[in-house]
């Protein structure tokens, strides 16, 4: 028997439907934030490999992003639940995170350009990555909270679909930037230990788009004050007057929170290996090189962006199909098994264009990962209050699997013959496990 938040009232005011323009504005800044996230996910392995990182230690550099996420997002959720100022509740954190991200995006790709020794450049890059992911997490989470705060259950699927579309559109832009800049003549090679200009300029332009998009959402969105929030969410007093016991909130979380979290574990571990090893994998299988200073390796790095863009396109297309599948659990499971098939195909493909097929399939899994978990969990949390805290805590189901996967990456890579392409087969197996775990997901809402 689930225990609901003690502040839940029997009667609450129904939230009115919001116009499409408001739903769009709520998530528009996510487009810019996702460009930053896409640039990070597609280029971090490339940047650190260029600086001199060994493939067996490459996954360790990926521990920082989820580690910062698991620290920052619950804090942002807790603080923003209690915040109210002229800018709103969530938007101040969104805006501050974006400002820091812009600064760090101008520093990170230059880690090898300041004449530092390899070890110093690596430390500089790690510190920059830590601040970048902290700020991206700080800017990203408020968008999910805004939907949870302001959108009723009837419109929530549409709101998260809009967010998913903007997320994938931002990913598409971020992923293809290095390829585009190389196409127009910006250098894609550089001296040993230096990141190419095509990557550096991608981060600069991404930073500019990020801040413009966040400013747009900050100006267009007016959040609920605490009293109005309490009225629409069935609470007997505003959240900014209430003390928070995080352990108690976790113990009282609905079963859906935990069952979806189990699925999340396998999904995000799989995608961690995709982000970490795709560059090295396709450089080896399609360009037949493991030399990070070679033109072939850097071309493979550009192609990773194209493949991830294909994945984003596949995700957008599949999201339309997913919305037409009446059984949510079946749609979730089908999406993940298609992604698993895509991952398992990659090590056996040696043509860069044929790789479009598996990455389209991987996009199906990504579409489900973006839409299903938060729709299921936010519906189940109706009436519990503390939406920001809960979503910050739920982010642990994204961060913890990435930390575990990154910590074990070097060991698993050695186990599979030190062939980076084999790590994508491992990712496929993880998604199969995630598919099986969808059977335990509880779809009940707070009203059940």
Image (tube, rainbow, N blue to C red):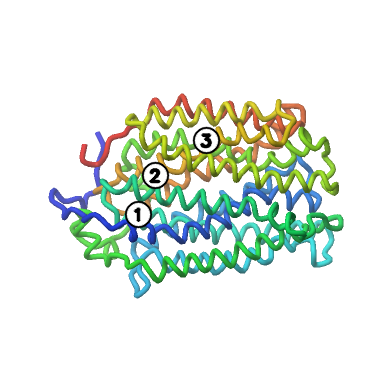
- Taking 401 as reference, is 425 above or below it? above
Q: Residue furthest front?
A: 184
Residue at 60% across / 60% down in the picture? 132
| Residue 36 in which image quadrant | bottom right
Side (left or right) of 285 relative to 98: right
Cβ–Cβ below 8 Å for labels 1 and 2?
Answer: yes
| 37 or 182, nearer to the observer | 182
Side (left or right) of 214 relative to 21: right
- Identify the residue position indicated by label 2 in the image: 374
Residue 244 horizontal/vertical position (percent): 33, 56
Q: Quadrant of the C terminus?
A: top left
Residue 4 horizontal/vertical position (percent): 24, 44
Label 3: which secondary element: helix
Q: Earlier in the sequence, mark 1 or mark 2?
A: 1
- Identify the residue position indicated by label 1 in the image: 147
Spatial CA span between label 1 and label 3 = 23 Å
Residue at 33% across / 53% down in the picture? 148
Spatial CA span between label 1 and label 2 = 10 Å
Residue 296 horizontal/vertical position (percent): 82, 44
């Amino acid at each position: 028997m689930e225990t609901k938040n003690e502040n839940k009232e029997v009667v609450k005011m129904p939230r009115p439907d919001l116009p499409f323009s408001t739903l769009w504005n709520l998530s528009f800044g996510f487009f810019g934030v996702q460009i930053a996230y896409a640039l990070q996910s597609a280029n971090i392995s490339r940047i650190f490999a260029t600086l001199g990182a060994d493939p067996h230690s490459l996954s360790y550099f990926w521990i920082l992003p989820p580690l910062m996420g698991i620290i920052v997002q619950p804090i942002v959720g807790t603080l923003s639940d209690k915040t109210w100022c002229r800018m709103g509740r969530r938007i101040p954190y969104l805006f501050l995170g974006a400002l820091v991200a812009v600064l760090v995006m101008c520093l990170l790709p230059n880690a090898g350009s300041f004449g530092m020794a390899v070890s110093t450049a690596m430390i500089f890059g790690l510190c920059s990555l830590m601040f970048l992911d902290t700020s991206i997490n700080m800017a990203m989470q408020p968008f999910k909270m805004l939907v949870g705060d302001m959108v009723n259950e009837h419109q929530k699927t549409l709101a998260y679909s809009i967010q998913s579309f903007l997320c994938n559109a931002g990913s598409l832009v971020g992923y293809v930037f290095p390829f585009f800049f190389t196409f127009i003549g910006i250098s894609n090679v550089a001296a040993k230990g230096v990141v190419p200009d095509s990557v550096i300029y991608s981060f600069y332009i991404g930073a500019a788009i990020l801040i413009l998009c966040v400013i747009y959402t900050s100006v267009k969105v007016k959040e609920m004050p605490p009293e109005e929030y309490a009225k629409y969410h069935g609470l007997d007093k505003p959240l900014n007057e209430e003390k928070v016991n995080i352990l108690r909130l976790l113990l009282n979380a609905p079963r859906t929170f935990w069952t979806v979290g189990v699925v999340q574990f396998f999904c995000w571990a799989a995608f961690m290996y995709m982000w970490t090893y795709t560059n090295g994998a396709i450089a080896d299988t399609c360009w037949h090189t493991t030399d990070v200073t070679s033109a072939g390796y850097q071309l493979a790095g550009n192609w990773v962006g194209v493949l991830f863009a294909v994945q984003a396109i596949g995700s957008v297309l599949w999201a339309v199909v997913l919305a037409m599948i009446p059984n949510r659990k079946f749609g979730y499971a089908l999406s993940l098994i298609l992604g698993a098939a895509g991952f398992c195909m990659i090590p056996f493909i040696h043509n860069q264009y044929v790789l479009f097929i598996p990455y389209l399939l991987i996009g199906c899994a990504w579409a489900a990962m973006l839409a299903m978990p938060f729709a299921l969990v936010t519906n189940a949390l109706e009436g519990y209050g503390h939406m920001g805290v809960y979503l910050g805590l739920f982010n642990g189901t994204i961060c913890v699997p990435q930390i575990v996967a990154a910590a074990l990456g070097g060991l698993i890579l050695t186990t599979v013959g030190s062939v980076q392409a084999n790590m994508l087969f491992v990712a496929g197996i993880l998604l199969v496990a995630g598919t099986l775990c969808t059977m335990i997901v509880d779809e009940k809402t707070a009203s059940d």
